[in-house]
Amino acid sequence: MSLRLSLLTREYPPHIYGGAGVHVGQLAKHLGPLCDLVDVQCMGQPRPGATAHAETYPEGANAALRVLGTDVAMAAAVPEVDLVHSHTWYANLAGLMAGKFRSVPHVVTSHSLEPHRPWKAEQLGGGYNLSLWAERTAFLDASAVIAVSAGMRRDVLASYDDLDPARVHVVHNGVDTEEFQPDPALDQLLQWGIDPQRPLVVFVGRVTRQKGLVHLLRAAQRFDPETQLLLLAGAPDTPQIAEQFEHAFGHLSQTRPGVVWIEQMVSRTALRQALTQATVFACPSIYEPLGIVNLEAMACQAAVVASAVGGIPEVVEDGQTGLLVPYDQAQADDPAYLAGFEEAFAQSVNRLTRDQELAQRLGQAGRRRCLDHFAWPQIARQTVAVYEQAMADFAGR
């Protein structure tokens, strides 16, 4: 069938800071052979393959208000298409408006849920209420909602209980298994002072409450003495979170050697080397709809130790491709519970650093799982199937 679509997103390569940007970049690439037109509207500075819109209006306003102002510009720039597909609350209203203006179905992908991220109020202030409203309004009006995991689908329906379950579909995130594959080179790690003869735990992610980085730093106090910790972590959400992280990092680095923090964004080559050499990839997130970063680590044959939240158990098979550590958000205010979580996380890491043959077996199984279940061509075809259903439902209204 003929299919022309517009993807609306805040992030788009090469300027990305999270999993949604990775997702949209790969989705656009792999939808190309399946569609007659794949238009991309994004926010920020100009870049190849997309029409970019600056977040400058209203000038000097709260960041969320500037996003909504940019949504209007994005909607106005959408060409004649058969369907629009928006990603994250930042672009959801742009998709809603473009769908109404062009009289075409609007599909949204739920990469995360604003009601599950109350800490965003620290970053956005009153703008958090706007992000809640924008997401809810777009979801309830959308012809289809794509959840990136079954866990995310449950959260979507729990958060928006007046949403028709038949309109909520599961299409997992994917991973580029050609870009992310084992790389035995060591030059970048040696520059960072990493000893390839010692066990290595790697973390990749933003400095935000969602990623649970402070829990990892506390757990690392219980890692075996010879274990190294490499943190590829930057872009803190707020000065307060940055200060909390820096305090915990300073304490850890004073009490044990082999703790390295790289704050700036690293190249894909450096990232592949780090993931390949990792004895353990650590993902202590307290909220994670799926976790593309786990897929990237698994594709590089790293064993994963992760918190069992959101969609992570759909990626990391406990005892097969990694180890899962239970985490209950409802007990997040209990210091004793958090200490127990951090202790269990440390024990799981130590289990793999002490048994590197087991870690290697889990890592090899992880790459096979990525190849079998999370390759992007397969994800793109599943996405087109949702488009076709949304178009049929829209035509039948």
Image (tube, grey):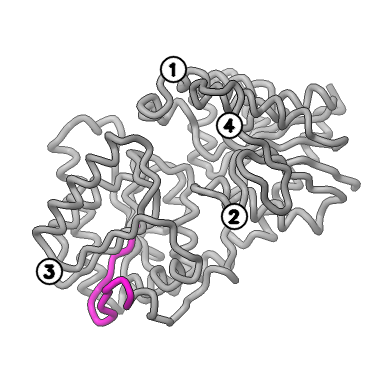
Give the CA distance from mark 1 to mark 3: 45 Å
- Quadrant of the image for the C terminus? top right
Q: Quadrant of residue 273?
A: bottom left
Which circle marks residue 126 in the picture? Answer: 1
In the image shown, does 84 or 331 lie closer to the viewer? 84
Give the CA distance from mark 4 to mark 1: 15 Å
Q: Which residues are magenta?
A: 190-203
Inspect the magenta stretch and tell me whether residue 315 lies in it: no
Q: Earlier in the sequence, mark 1 or mark 2?
A: 2
Secondary structure, mark 1, is loop
Q: Earlier in the sequence, mark 3 or mark 4?
A: 4
Query: Which residue position is annotated with label 4?
Result: 90
User: Residue 34: in sight, yes or no?
Assistant: yes
Q: Earlier in the sequence, mark 3 or mark 2?
A: 2
Query: Which residue position is annotated with label 3?
Result: 225
Amino acid type, callout 2: Pro
Q: Quadrant of residue 123?
A: top left
- Horizontal side, residue 190 vs residue 23: left or right: left
